[in-house]
Image (cartoon, coloured by chain):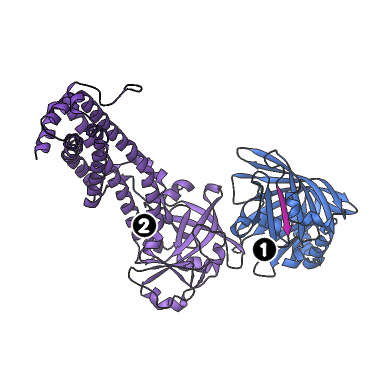
Chain colours: A purple, B blue
Amino acid sequence: MLLFKLAYRNIRGAGLRSFLNILVMSIIFVLIVWMQGLYEGVTVQATTDMIREDVAGGHYRHPAYDPNDLVDLMEAHQSYQPQQKAVDRHDLEPVLMINASVYPNGRMQSALLKGIRPDQALLDFPAHELKTQMDGVIPALIGKRMADMMQVALGDEFIIQWRDRQGTFDAATARIVHIMTTIVPTIDAGQIWIPLKRLQEMTGMTDEATYMIARPGFQLQDPQNWEYYSQDELVHSIVNLMETKSSGGMFLYLILLLMAMLSIFDTQVLAIFKRRKEIGTLVALGMTQKEVSRLFTLEGTMFGLLGAALAVILGIPICLYTWRNGINFGPVMDSFNLAVSPIIYPIYTPEMIAATFILVLFLVMVISGIPARKIASLRPTDAIAGRRIYKVRGEK
Amino acid sequence: MKKYYIVIIISIFFMSALPTAPLPDGMEILKQVDDNITAENRIMTSRMIVRNRRSEREIKAKTWIRGMDQAFTEYLSPAREQGTKMLKEKDRMWIYSPSTDRIIQIAGHMLRQSVMGSDLSYEDMMEDPILSNLYTAKTLSVDTLQERLCWILVLTSKKEDIAYHSRKLWVDQERKIILREERFAKGGTLLKETDVLHVFQIDGRWYPKEILYRNVLNQNSEGTRFIIESLELDAEIPDWRFSKAALRRS
């Protein structure tokens, strides 16, 4: 307790120097917690939106369907008649996909033509817009990204060219009946959605699908030739990506921590040098060198503790504000290649805050202890005489 | 005046009543076209001029062709494409790019990509050139194109796995060469047009000298001109030329 009181008094005595150290520590605490909260927020937001708009309870895929390699897409379709009852109950939502070329304003572009039932009930997806009846013209639903890419607006018509299951070309006019605003690129970029039945007729792939979306909690007893990908597996790529991005952010944490540790180490070395007479007096009065060393370590650690206390005062309003209102990153978020809105709502968990505080405080304690170790080998007479603790090279 | 009208009306009546010459069998004409174009071995140097609204590119190539199944193309210019080689073996195709030193098999949707940015796809190049193998032909009518008398043939695919469901050909009646071609989708939409702008004669056969290909749906493109600079028929081509090893050979 005596050591604690002494340490606190010494810190107060150091005035502005101590305050600056505490301020730097608190800023670093807040920054680290805020950044981690941001990464957590992006991960949760991306996975939640993806589940709601694309994944639902998981996908049953044709074995040849690989979203990352669409070379064999035209081979990746099969009948879902054995699962027809589940499809009728909307436990499964079939999606058929083919490659196509589109000609908006006469320009040729590649696209993925996807068929979905307009009355689908598993996804937060405006498929009902495809119910629009038009003579001969195919109703098409696209995302905002695709609309920008194609440079088209609502009501615009364009030609779609595709091949049927035998490989024969066909072409027809499509009209954009709805442009959806979605942040999930897997249902937007490069894709055109049309009614499933229509796509099946166009390709001659009656009652066939490339993959089927499952209702959360539903599982086929006998999936036959369908390969099941669970919700976790489908969002795993996002979690992995965020972990990679987050470890990139670790570099920034390290720089911040290094700065804080450098400041504490520097303060400690300076304090031991300036207060060597005091160290000698304390030892002469009966304190052991180890106790004096502990006193200095405690002083350093106290910078961390007081920094943490100030971080709570500074950080709570900042974190609370950003948690409630989010942070608008604008077009910067597009560079993340993730299904995230430009407004990010950070998520701060007690575990994450506690782990950050414990880690930083531990590091502060270790760093404060390193210069203080020198005190243990100090002779009291040398200290009282004001001799150096840290010797200059060549000095005896 | 009234007399003149009566004479004209009677003449028209009699002219329309005159028996017209029957149109020849479409399949016969198509076989003659195929016979004209077919040669065992061919070595050809060609230029391909790709034009769009913004730019024009010229690509030179040398092609060795054996029968209907084997073809080897080496791009000679521009510098960016120089050394790129393509090998066609029946229904398979490989492409070698010297910049990556890799041989890639062109398959699946890649076959639909354009060759060097032109209006031709790899698939168009892979197609069996013997049309009578793929289509049934019907003679539709007679027309004059480039001051030449032509038969208009309508081709309908024999099988279901043919890329273009139907085609319309303008065949030079005398030279048995296609002067114009239109390719249609299953639903009847016109997809591609081909016009033979110049022809030349070699070993008694007529060959296209300059062809203009156009993807009708792509309004950005002003077409691809394919010009044959030299053609050697029934030339000697060693077997190694049609091997994958030849792709890496400089």
Q: Amino acid at mark 1?
A: Ser
Tag 2's secondary structure?
A: helix
Q: Residue at x 31, y 53 (%)?
A: A44
Range shown magenta: B84-91
Give the percent coordinates (x, y) of residue A241. 40, 51
Q: Which residue is mark 2?
A: A50
Q: Residue at x 52, y 49 (%)?
A: A104
Q: Do the CB atoms of the residues marked 1 and 2 lie less than 8 Å apart? A: no
Q: Which residue is mark 1?
A: B166
Which quadrant would residue A17 be assigned to in this image? top left
Identify whether A355 is placed above or below A278. below
Q: Chain of mark 1?
A: B
Q: Residue at x 30, y 50 (%)?
A: A40
Identify whether B196 is placed above or below B51. below
Instruction: Report the Cα–Cα distance between label 1 and label 2.
Output: 44 Å
Q: Amino acid at mark 2?
A: Met
